[in-house]
Image (cartoon, rainbow, N blue to C red):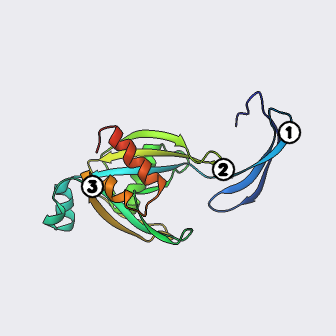
Amino acid sequence: MTVSDEWTLLEERTEYETGWYDGGYDLLEQPDGSEKRYYWADLPPAVVVVARIDADVLEETDGDAESADGDRLLFVEQYRPTIRETHLELPAGIVEDGESYTQAAARELEEETGFRPTSTALLEAYAVATGVLRHDRAIVYAEGLELGERELDTNEFLEVTTVPVDAALEQVREGPTNDATLSGLLLAKEDGLL
C-alpha cells in the first residue's frame, strides 16, 4: 500500500480475521500533523459477469420457445442474509489465487449458472467503497455460452433466470439489486454491448 508524501503510516493493525475478510485500521499522521485511525475491511478481488446467451442456445437447453424471443442476459436471484432481501444479480464471485479476472468470470459463470462462455472480455477493473474497503472488482462480458456443469458452493442457493437484453437495465433498476449489477450493466451499455 502506498502512502502519500503528505501522510505518514504510523501503524497498520489487523484486529480480526474471518473466512470472508480481515478487518482492522491504519493509524495515520494526517497532512496537518494530527493522528487518526482509518478502519478498513480487506476482501479478496471479485468479478461480476455480464453474460449474454443466444436465444437458440436458451431454447435448446430449456425447451421453452417463448423464452427464445431474442438474446438474453443471465442473472441469479439469491437471498442475501446480511440485508435480509432477495436480489436479482449478475453472476459474481471471488477471484482465486493465480486467476485472471476473465478466468474467474468463466469459472464463476459456469459454477453458478451451468453455462460456460467461449469468449470473455474485461470491461473494467476498479476499487470498491474506498472509504472503508480494500477491495477490487472487475466487470467481465461473456458470450458464446455453451451448456456446462453447474457446481454451487455450500452457501449458494441461487435461482438462474434470464432477462431480455433490452430490458435488463430497466428491470434491475426496479430493484432490489446491488451496486455490482448496476455497475456491470451500465458499463456494458456504455461499451455498446447492450
Mark 1: few/some/many CA within 10 Å (<14, 14-19, 20+): few
- The residue identified by callout 1 is 34
Residue 9 horizontal side relative to residue 67, left or right: right
Q: CA distance from mark 1 to mark 3?
A: 51 Å
Q: Which residue is mark 2?
A: 132
Query: Quadrant of the rendered structure where residue 32 is?
Result: top right
- At label 3, the amino acid type is Ala
**How far apart in space, not on screen, are marks 3 and 2 (Cα)?**
33 Å
Quadrant assignment for the C terminus: top left
Would residue 35 be visible to someone looking at this image? Answer: yes
In the picture provided, is 189 more to the left or to the right than 132? Answer: left
The vertical placement of 134 against 20, above or below, is: above
* Type of amino acid under label 2: Val
Element type at mark 2: loop
Judged by depth in the image, the label closer to the viewer, 1 or 2, is 1
Nearer the observer, 174 or 117: 174
Q: Nearer the viewer, residue 122 or 170?
A: 170
Residues marked 1 and 3 touching at CB (< 8 Å): no
| Mark toward the start of the polypeptide (1 vs 3) | 1
Quadrant occupied by the N terminus: top right
Q: Which residue is label 3 attached to?
A: 167
At 44% from the left and 71% from the top, the residue drawn is 157
Q: Is residue 105 visible?
A: no
Most foreground residue, 156 or 181? 181
Helix, strand or loop status at disc 1: loop
| 189 left or right, relative to 71 | right
Picture coordinates of residue 130 (x, y %)? 62, 45
Q: CA distance from mark 1 to mark 2?
A: 20 Å
Q: Report which quarter residue 124 is drawn in.
A: top left
